[in-house]
Image (cartoon, rainbow, N blue to C red):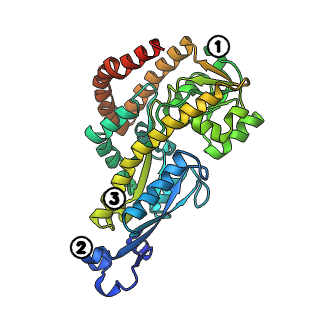
Amino acid sequence: MKRRDFVSGMVLAAGATACSKTPESGASSTTSRQDEVFEWKMVTSWPPKLPGLGVGAENIAKHIERASNGRLKIKVYAGGELVPALEIFGAVSGGTAQMGHGASYYHKGKVDAAQYFTTVPFGMNANEMYAWLYYGDGLKLWRELYAPHNLVPFAAGSTGVQMGGWFNREINSVEDLRGLKMRMPGLGGEVMRRAGVTTVLMQGSEIFTSLQTGAIDATEWVGPYNDMSLGLHKAAKYYYYPGWHEPGPILECIVNKQAYDSLPADLQDLIELACQAMNCDMQAEYTWGNAQSLAQLTQDPNIELREFPEDVMNLLRDLTKEVLEEFSANDPWAAKIHKSYFDFLAKSADNQRISEYAYLRDRARSR
Ligand code: CA
């Protein structure tokens, strides 16, 4: 986006014209910059009013507008309203919108290594991702990766560990995976493909109809809270866990670089803080919502909750290793991110084993 295009989207507060200067005229005083009002668009990958992901994106915009006292107003668009749900990367990079909310693994084919910043099969949970992003090199690498694409990324929410997905037939062995047509994005989708599944990527709003009509045999989406909001429990019988492919996916907020650079420093900080706050809020919403929704699902006589068989998990784990090794051997950015990611995970795994894992294992035994 050219700078003048962005500036045309900025309006000055009434009565402030005399003492305000646009970024183009080199404003530097804090007083004058406090009078500038910015009107932005945020495009998202989510169906309208979707709990968690969609409402979370709206809340980021709402908090920024309130906390900036109206200086940064952000109009939020659901997937397909302004641009297609899976095309926000190009829309924000090119300046059609100044901001976007979605998931970095949707950009496979444009910037393949970005998939690491959403989630890695059998990889880190959300807490570990936040540790790596904020205290390790994660966010730094993410910003370097997106810089040539004219984008500044922020971690902006997580669903927590997801579910394995909905299947319209039983999965009793690896043989049962062969020939399935399943909606699954990201590295997990590539793993499933190698297990004999035909994987497809489709936006959230298309999943229910595709599953109900038999256009697909299976789908992953998120977890009980969001899956029920799409009605997936009415379209398939078998609900499998765990979400091996998305153990703690991170959502992204992306900002057009020129738009970001045009903001005064306090509004830049406000975007960072609003996204950090969403990391806490969204995970809390999913932890709460999943517990309520799972309780409902387990009462439904038409639903069978199943754990993937051990041989299926073993195959998926082996294939994940193969996929990641090939990916990092062929993509220099993937290699760089892979090393940083797994250097931390190797240490974190030991810590998680004696803390979260040991605690949850013993809590389950005591029930
Ligand atoms: Ca998912």
| Among the two numbered marks 1 and 2 on one chain, the one whose residue lies closer to the N terminus | 2
In the image, taking residue 93 as reference, residue 138 lies left or right, namely: left
The amino acid type, in three-letter code, at marker 2 is Thr
- Residue 324, image quadrant: top left
Callout 3 secondary element: helix
Q: Is residue 221 visible?
A: no
Callout 2 secondary element: helix
| Among the two numbered marks 1 and 3 on one chain, the one whose residue lies closer to the N terminus | 1
Which residue is pictured at 37% across the width and 86% down the height?
15
The amino acid type, in three-letter code, at marker 3 is Leu
Residue identifier under label 3: 270
Label 1, label 2: how many angstroms apart (C-alpha)? Answer: 65 Å
Which residue is pictured at 30% across the width and 73% down the height?
34
Residue identifier under label 2: 30
Q: Residues within 10 Å of mark 1 (few under 14, many from 20)?
A: some
The amino acid type, in three-letter code, at marker 1 is Asn
Ligand 1 rendered quadrant:
top right
Q: Is residue 315 visible?
A: yes
